[in-house]
Image: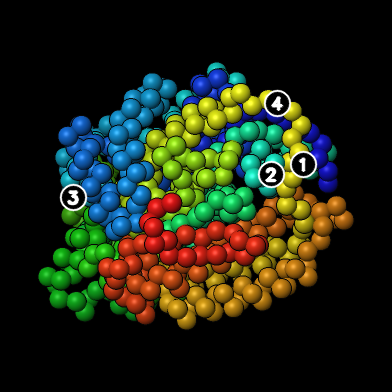
Amino acid sequence: MRCTSRIYVDVLVVGSGLAGLTAAISAAEEGARTAIISRGRLCSGSSFYPGTWGLGLVAPEDEKDEADLEETILRIGEGMANPALVHTFTGKIMGSLEYLEHLGVPLREAKANKEREFIPCFDHKNRLWKGIEKPGSSQMMSKRLRELKVACLEHMTILRLLKEGERVCGALAVKRKDEGVSLVEILSPAVILATGGMGGLFTHRLTTDDVTGIGQYLALESGAKLFNLEFMQMMLGHVHPAPKTIYNEKMFRFSRFYGADKELFSEWEEEEREKQLELRSGYGPFTTRLSSKKVDLEIYKESQRRREGIRVVYQEEVKRHQPEFIKTYFDWLKEEKNLTMDDLVWLSMYAHASNGGIAIDEEAFTGVEGLYACGEVTGGMHGADRLGGLSSANGLVFGRIAGKAAARSERGKKEGKAAYYYQPLYVILEAKKYLHTIQKLNQQHAMLIRSERGSKNVLQELSKLQSQMERDKIPLEKTDCSMEELLRTVDLEAALELTLALHQAILLRRESRGPHYREDCPKRVNGLNIPIYSWKQDQEIVTHLQMSKFT
């Protein structure tokens, strides 16, 4: 396999979810020749995840509400959100919403926007709520890309970032052609990573298969820092029917849950059960911050006893009187999945979104010249827990910021043949098997219940796996491998390094905070409200508590 083509652009965007699409459009509107690369079709990733109807997006109700929203994000972030990023976000979200409407993206309005179900996850009040429907948003954003003549490189996967000295200057990608597979060099003085979270590290995940952690891995290899990796969202989803469909958390107070031989929570006092399920209806992902954490822990432990998970039955009350938010969900469920409230559904816990990722500043800059990042691939906007509706809003705001900043950074740079380099490519024919081993280790030791013993076991197993991988490496030029074998190898590289960093962070955070639950350290420690950073040093992953807070 050899490089058969070379592409020159001013800005390269990697990933085509909401953040990536917004970044590409914004860069092109600044006059930059722009390309956007997507592992699958355009408009993919978690933004267009098929297991939910669309994206909720929240913003301040008015200018007076900005300060309260900012304070709320920082409070539920439990010291792990970067105040500078949060301030930038709250000051720009309204303008970004207007920009989305300017693009012609249809936004759903809430008719009963004061209903309690429209209060965002973990919030204490209603905000301005908008719904982004997948078909309309993908249609209008694709149209704008065509108008701006953005090169849309679909079904192409990034393998390496190109570097000239310490500067990122493009990417090496692989694409499928009629006659086989070929490598493509994309030379660009500015690269924006918008590849989503790290759900691909787990066997059970509520993400699309192109969310592999590749962006975090490429940033790490290029000299950027990652942080807050231990804060990942875990949520209930369907095992069957309609596997990997997200369970609507507003239904907790209207649900009865059954395990193998009993109704869950039946041993609790009735008043306590109602109180905790009521509280649990206010948010989607697991958190240790609230007393209702014991709801998730019992569900998780019971769901581990059998493959089909736990069974849920909805109460008659909600079938007769559905709040608007819940009705929207079940109307979509009927239309897309042919399911109603009367159908039997089995649930289990899944890995969902990442609250941590690449460290960036207010300009979406990673600290590595030529490299920017936006959306869920980044960390710092959300902290330990994340306010509902902020993932979409964050991707929109920082997608615009990244696109503009990258376009400005490339101006004045002359096009020419750079003396670039990249890490050698190789293939591991057993990569699929090794990757599944890593995913199973994370599923067992990095989901809801974590411990020192579990993470040390993972690190020991990874050490053995690394030795096996080294023996199995075949230089790319010495094998006639398939595209799938090459992609699985790169996914394995990413999974290995990110799992090392994740479990090092789990071991360092000897407490429970947000979605990070250490069974052997079940309480929050006030002195540990310090971010944990990971970076590459002498080819090794280094993970430390960053005493100077956000850098």
Looking at this view, is 261 or 97 the one in front?
97
Q: Secondary structure at mark 1?
A: strand
Q: Secondary structure at mark 4?
A: loop
Which of marks 3 and 1 precedes in the sequence? 3
Looking at this view, is 102 or 419 the one in front?
419
Give, as a three-letter code, the residue at label 3.
Answer: His
Most distant residue in the right direction: 478
Give, as a three-letter code, the residue at label 2.
Answer: Gly
| Residue carrying label 1 | 183
Give, as a three-letter code, the residue at label 1.
Answer: Leu
Residue for point 39% across, 58% down: 548
Mark 4 to mark 1 CA distance (whole Å): 21 Å
Side of 316 relative to 164 (left or right)? left
The label on residue 165 is: 2
| Residue carrying label 3 | 124
Which of marks 4 and 2 precedes in the sequence? 2
The label on residue 415 is: 4
Give, as a three-letter code, the residue at label 4.
Answer: Glu
Image quarter of residue 115: top left
- 2 versus 265 height, above or below: above
Side of 110 relative to 355 (left or right)? left
Q: Nearer the viewer, mark 2 or mark 3?
A: 2
- Residue 550: image x %, image y %? 40, 53
